[in-house]
Image: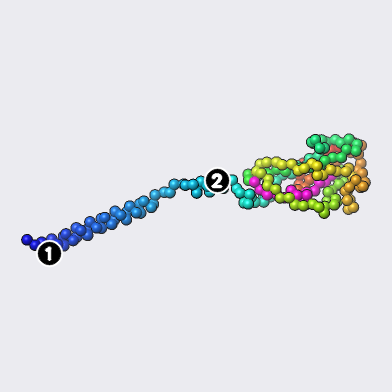
Amino acid sequence: MAPTQQQIYARRRALLLLVLVVVGVLVWNAFSGGSQPQQAGPTSAASVSATASTPASEIVDCQPGVVEVFARIGDKDGEKSSFASGEKPYLWYDITNTGPVDCNFNVGSRVTFFTITSGDETYYSSRDCDRSADQDLVTVLKANSTISSSREGAIWERVRSSGTGCGAEQEPVPSGGASYFLKVEVNGVYSENPVQFLLN
């Protein structure tokens, strides 16, 4: 007995419904699989490492206020505050990056100045010296670290500097227990501590 028209429609509807269910399941699996959270892989870990250890090319200039300079005076063996007759003081400085990140700072001789005063009078300024060979020297100051300049580079001849220079040929300053103060400027940052010393 041949199927009636009503039975044919019912079979077609059932087949269509089955196809729709299969297609719906496939679509659901595709979307639910693609929406799973991605795990951090090697690329993500490498990005974090690069951020934690900044390449030298990405180090920026030191921000205002993070650099501190401290004047130092002594001889080739270290600091001292009293100098015998004829003994020439060595001048240098410590510089500290108080910030949380490494930064670039110019510590070159072109931007470094030593000043020696007594009372209200300035007896010596390295600005009066021959500065034709002075240069810039940009260095990386490590975070929360201190470095020292070379103490060999600046020896005071115990003379009064002037527009004609600061060498041994200049007028000697008073000694015999005279008290002086040393200050330093490095790239616009002034030393925190004027250092007192005596010339005998």
Locate the C terminus by quadrant: top right
For image coordinates 86% across by 36% down, the residue present is 83
**Quadrant housing residue 71:** top right
**Quadrant housing residue 98:** top right
Residue 65, can we see it? no
Which mark is on residue 106?
none
Q: Is residue 149 magenta?
A: no
Amino acid at the residue labelled 2 = Ser
Q: Over which residues does the magenta segment extend?
A: 102-116
Q: Is residue 3 above or below residue 83?
A: below
Amino acid at the residue labelled 1 = Gln
Q: Which residue is mark 1?
A: 5
Q: Is residue 63 above or below residue 84?
A: below
Q: Position of residue 52 (x, y in %)?
A: 57, 45
Q: Is residue 103 magenta?
A: yes
Q: Which residue is mark 2?
A: 49
Q: From the viewer's perspective, is 159 left or right of 102?
A: right
Most extreme residue toward the bottom, as rendered?
5
